[in-house]
């Protein structure tokens, strides 16, 4: 299996794990402050990834070179998570999910600015098809629901979080100096956790940790282990093997995975029209799976 294909499979798993955090996260969003929640999830995830690194590649001293790199990456991803929860305090979930579909496009632009990664016409078409399919799913094939969409303060806050998420992806490749994904992820999580502790110290102290409902701890550990620790490794792994636009294109699958999560939780099966949107996202991903032919490769003449 090629490195590129392994990158695609890693992002497929990433999209499924992140979708689970939406279902569980919505159940605990109003029970704990955003900065406190994010700081704890980073701390738990850092402990898990640190143990994984020690058990596999180890933590080489060379990984500690230029620690500012981890601060940059940790700040970007911490910003995304904190602004997501702040945005969801006022933005309806449907509107926020629509904003999230802008991430691959922003990531493609960031990839060009930071790495000069070129988005080919076919990749741009695939991103467009994926965006249409994702919006189709998010608005549940309801044109009236789409027309009622309004951009409010919460959506604007969350959009800037999505910008941070989009920049994070190409920055991984730009700042990585050969460290294994698990080691690089550990450094990013530790740096992000430290920044969040400083930023959210008052929220951490004000939270009644002993009085939190059980569902908060269930959701927190899922988000920490799977939606943070595992997804960090998967994104880092894929970003070293795929262009930024292709990595972030898998965000288009998240609404479809959320539907499967909702079905598993007994909340009903979507209509056939909604499944049409799911089909579009799958078509977009299949287009992205196909390798581009380098323009520098000469094409033989027909007579040859």
Image (tube, rainbow, N blue to C red):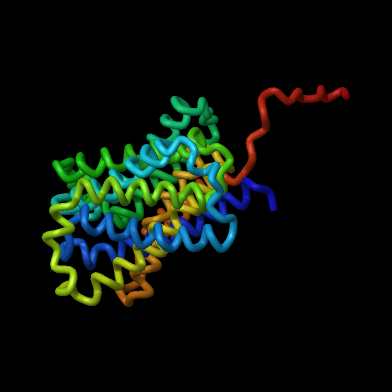
- On screen, 182 above or below 175? below
Left or right of 84 on screen, residue 59? right
Query: Could you tell me residue 268's position as x and y percent?
Result: 32, 73
Left or right of 304 on screen, residue 210? left
Q: Name which quarter of the figure residue 265 lies in.
A: bottom left
Q: Name which quarter of the figure residue 216 lies in.
A: bottom left
Query: Could you tell me residue 185's position as x and y percent?
Result: 46, 50
Give me the residue at 14% from left, 63% from top.
207
Whether residue 287 is visible to the viewer of this picture, yes or no, is no
Left or right of 287 on screen, residue 270? left
The quadrant of the image that shows the C terminus is top right
Give me the residue at 55% from left, 42% from top.
62
Give me the residue at 42% from left, 58% from top.
229
Residue furthest right in the image: 304
Q: Nearer the viewer, residue 125 or 90?
A: 90
Q: Nearer the viewer, residue 237 or 119?
A: 237
Query: Could you tell me residue 253's position as x and y percent?
Result: 43, 54
Left or right of 64 on screen, residue 192? left
Residue furthest left in the image: 206
Number of labels in the image equals 0
Q: Nearer the viewer, residue 136 or 144?
A: 136
Query: Could you tell me residue 3's position as x and y percent?
Result: 65, 47
Whether residue 241 is visible to the viewer of this picture, yes or no, is yes
Give me the residue at 34% from left, 41% from top.
76
């Amino acid at each position: 299996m090629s490195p590129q294909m392994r990158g695609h499979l890693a992002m497929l798993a990433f999209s499924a794990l992140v979708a689970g955090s939406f279902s569980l996260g919505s159940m605990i969003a109003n029970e704990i402050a955003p900065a406190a929640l994010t700081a704890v999830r980073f701390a738990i995830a850092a402990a898990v990834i640190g143990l994984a690194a020690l058990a596999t590649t180890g933590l080489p001293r060379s990984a500690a070179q230029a620690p500012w790199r981890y601060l940059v990456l940790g700040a970007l991803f911490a910003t995304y998570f904190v602004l997501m929860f702040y945005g969801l305090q006022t933005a309806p979930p449907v509107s926020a999910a629509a904003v999230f579909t802008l991430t691959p496009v922003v990531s493609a632009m960031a990839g060009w600015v930071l790495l000069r990664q070129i988005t080919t016409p076919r990749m741009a078409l695939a991103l467009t098809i994926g965006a249409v399919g994702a919006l189709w799913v998010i608005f549940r094939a309801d044109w009236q629901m789409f027309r009622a969409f309004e951009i409010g303060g919460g959506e604007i806050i969350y959009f800037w979080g999505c910008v941070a998420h989009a920049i994070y992806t190409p920055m991984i490749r730009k700042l990585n100096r050969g460290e294994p994904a698990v080691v690089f992820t550990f450094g990013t999580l530790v740096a992000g956790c430290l920044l969040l502790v400083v930023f959210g110290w008052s929220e951490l102290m004000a939270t009644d940790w002993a009085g939190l409902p059980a569902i908060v701890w269930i959701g927190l550990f899922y988000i920490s282990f799977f939606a943070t620790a595992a997804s960090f490794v998967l994104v880092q792994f894929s970003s070293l093997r795929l262009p930024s636009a292709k990595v972030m294109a898998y965000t288009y699958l998240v609404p479809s995975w959320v539907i499967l999560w909702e079905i598993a939780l007994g909340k009903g099966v979507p209509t056939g029209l909604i499944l049409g949107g799911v089909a579009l996202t799958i078509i977009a991903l299949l287009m992205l799976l196909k390798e581009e032919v380098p323009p520098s490769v000469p094409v033989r003449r027909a007579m040859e």
